[in-house]
Amino acid sequence: MDQYLLSLVFFAVSMVASPGPANMILLVAGAKFGLRKSLPFVLGIIFSKQFIIWPLGFGILTFFEYFPGLLNLIKGISCLYIIWLAWKLSNFKIKENSELVKAPSFFYGLPVHPTNPKAWAMVSVSFTSYIDISQNALNSTLLVAIVFILVQLVFHNMWCYFGHQLKIKFHGTKFEVWMMRFLSLLMLGSLTLLFF
């Protein structure tokens, strides 16, 4: 296995598996809806990283060098979106077979990574540190895209599953509402990692 690929895989695993806004959202979704019902949302989040990988792979990083304020705008939008998701997911108890509350769809997952500064940072570092610069842009971008899809398929589902296990443990107890609020606070707390 090529040294660049091996390094990229280890980097992607360390970044995707670690806590961050997307994983906290998946944890809460798993706790609220379970893994099976959240699967379209998980796939939307996985697909959403491609909205970052392909433009970065073809040179958008140079655009940010000329317009650094755009990164602050992305960070602000990111924070607002994550705050909205935390609020939306924290204000109710877990209900079994509820027809009134539907699991988030594939399309709810699409804005998660494009509005997540951690995702932008990890993809940027992937291209600047773990890609053989002698390769053409298409091959390099395809490699990064495939590695992230495979790593996300494992770890994003795992975070959602952990949330489902929390639901099993706390559903119907007096701690249920507090658990949902705590998970939402973790999601909000993950925003502080973006600024320090």
Image (spheres, grey):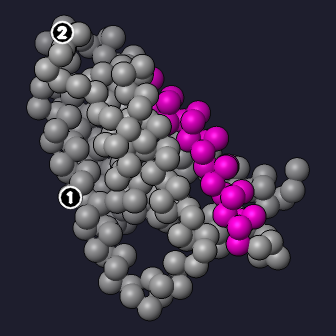
Instruction: Give the magenta part as a residue range.
Output: 137-163
Q: Position of residue 91 (x, y in %)?
A: 11, 32
Vertical position of residue 187 compared to residue 144: above or below = above
Name which residue type carries label 1: Leu
Q: Is residue 128 left or right of residue 7?
A: left
The label number, if any, that marks residue 80 in the structure image: 1
Vertical position of residue 20 compared to residue 172: above or below = below
Q: Position of residue 194 (x, y in %)?
A: 36, 62
Closer to the eye: label 1 or 2: 1
Q: Position of residue 104 (x, y in %)?
A: 29, 33
Q: CA distance from mark 1 to mark 2?
A: 31 Å
Where residue 154 sits, quadrant-wise, is top right
Is 109 inside the magenta-drawn segment? no
User: Circle 2: is it few (<14), some (14-19), or many (20+) Cα within 10 Å?
Assistant: few
Is 145 inside the magenta-drawn segment? yes
Which residue shows up at 21% across the image and 42% down it? 86
Where residue 168 sits, quadrant-wise, is top left
Q: According to the image, label 2 marks what residue?
A: 173
